[in-house]
Image: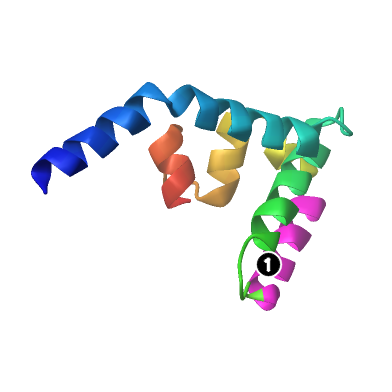
């Protein structure tokens, strides 16, 4: 059993470039119609919400409303993390926790 798992893991490691390429193309397709960073972020947020089987629409509504009311807060990574939660460090962990 362990041998099979090791073979599977090795296969995934050897072929991860295809997954990366697929994800890259997926995000490019979403973003290519937008030049403004705020519009790009909103497009990504909508796309993410659409991947959920049962998104919590009320929470999403409030979140998107806050973004539209504070567009300057999403101009760059630092301001977006602070917009999500001013207490968080400005890094990817802070983004995740926010």
Indicate the quadrant where residue 61 lies: bottom right
**Residue 2 visible (yes or no):** yes
> Who is closer to the viewer here, 15 or 79?
15
- Vertical side of 42 occupied by 17: above or below: above
x and y, in percent, of residue 47 in the image: 72, 52
- On the rendered structure, is 21 left or right of 5? right
- On the rendered structure, is 4 left or right of 30? left
> Who is closer to the viewer here, 12 or 50?
12
x and y, in percent, of residue 44 in the image: 71, 45
Write down the region rendered in magenta. 57-70
**Residue 89 visible (yes or no):** no
Q: Is residue 64 magenta?
A: yes
> Who is closer to the viewer here, 28 or 3?
3
> Who is closer to the viewer here, 23 or 71?
23
At 89% from the left edge and 33% from the top edge, which residue is drawn?
33
Indicate the quadrant where residue 54 lies: bottom right
Q: Main secondary structure of the magenta part?
A: helix
At 74% from the left edge and 55% from the top edge, which residue is drawn?
46
**Residue designated by label 1:** 60
x and y, in percent, of residue 95 in the image: 48, 42
């Amino acid at each position: 059993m362990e041998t099979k798992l090791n073979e599977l893991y090795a296969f995934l490691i050897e072929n991860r470039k295809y997954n990366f390429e697929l994800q890259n193309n997926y995000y490019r397709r979403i973003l290519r119609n937008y030049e403004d960073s705020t519009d790009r972020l909103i497009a990504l947020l909508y796309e993410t919400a659409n991947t959920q089987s049962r998104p919590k629409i009320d929470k999403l509504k409030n979140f998107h409303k806050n973004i539209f009311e504070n567009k300057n807060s999403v101009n760059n990574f630092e301001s977006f993390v602070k917009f999500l939660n001013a207490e968080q460090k400005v890094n990817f962990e802070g983004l995740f926790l926010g």
